[in-house]
Amino acid sequence: MLRVGLCLSIIVCGLALRRFGLGLGLPSFVVKYGGSILWGSMVFFLVAMAASNRSRPSIALISAAIAVCVELFRLVHAPWLDTFRLTLAGALLLGRIFSVWDLVAYGVGIVLAIGLDRFASSVHKIA
């Protein structure tokens, strides 16, 4: 249940960052890559919920593989797929353009998620 709450919080933060970040005066770099970092963290927690019996390193590797596959999928173009990518859902789920920097941001997000998961579970044990 803890991971569900963390995942939902990350999704809300990511959507808020994309929707309001520029309006709040945040640099576009922070909005763009902050969203990618949060996306990587979200993937970690989705995998952690689906494979709760696995270790954090295993969850991180699976998450990284998913992130790489999603990013590489951006190199695939078909009219229907490109049309979907122009929608909000398509942009948030699949992205629009391939970027090595997104891969780096996903990695950062996954590493941060490992730390957050470790911290949250240790605090949860104390409470």
Image: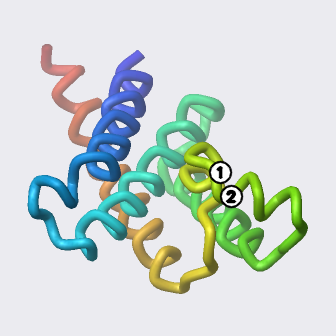
Determine the residue positioned at 35% across, 46% down.
Answer: 14
Q: Label 2 is placed on what type of residue?
A: Arg
117 relative to 97 in the view: left or right? left
Q: Residue at x 84, y 73 (%)?
A: 77
Give the mark, 2 or 1, whose residue is nearer the N terminus: 2
In the image, residue 44 sits, relative to residue 48, either above or below, namely: below
Q: Looking at the image, do the residues carrying marks 2 and 1 touch, with CB atoms under 8 Å apart?
A: yes
Res 90 label: 1
Residue 12 pos. (x, y %)? 33, 34
Determine which residue is flagged by label 2.
85
Q: Residue at x 50, y 47 (%)?
A: 44
Query: Could you tell me how many numbered marks the image carries?
Result: 2
Residue closer to the observer: 15 or 54: 15
Judge from the rendering whether residue 108 lies leftward or rightward of residue 23; answer left or right: right
The local crowd at label 1, few if under 14, some if 14 to 19, many if 20 or more residues have their Cα within 10 Å, is: some
Quadrant of the image for the N terminus? top left
Q: Secondary structure at mark 2?
A: helix
Residue found at x 44% / y 78%: 104
On residue 119, which mark appears?
none
Distance from disc 2 to disc 1, alpha carbons, whole Å, reads: 4 Å
The answer to whether residue 104 is above or below residue 67 is: below
Circle 2: is it few (<14), some (14-19), or many (20+) Cα within 10 Å?
Answer: some
Q: Quadrant of residue 99?
A: bottom right
Q: Nearer the viewer, residue 107 or 121?
A: 107
Q: Position of residue 56 (x, y in %)?
A: 48, 48
| Rendered image coloring scheme | rainbow
Going by the numbered disc 1, the residue's amino acid type is Gly
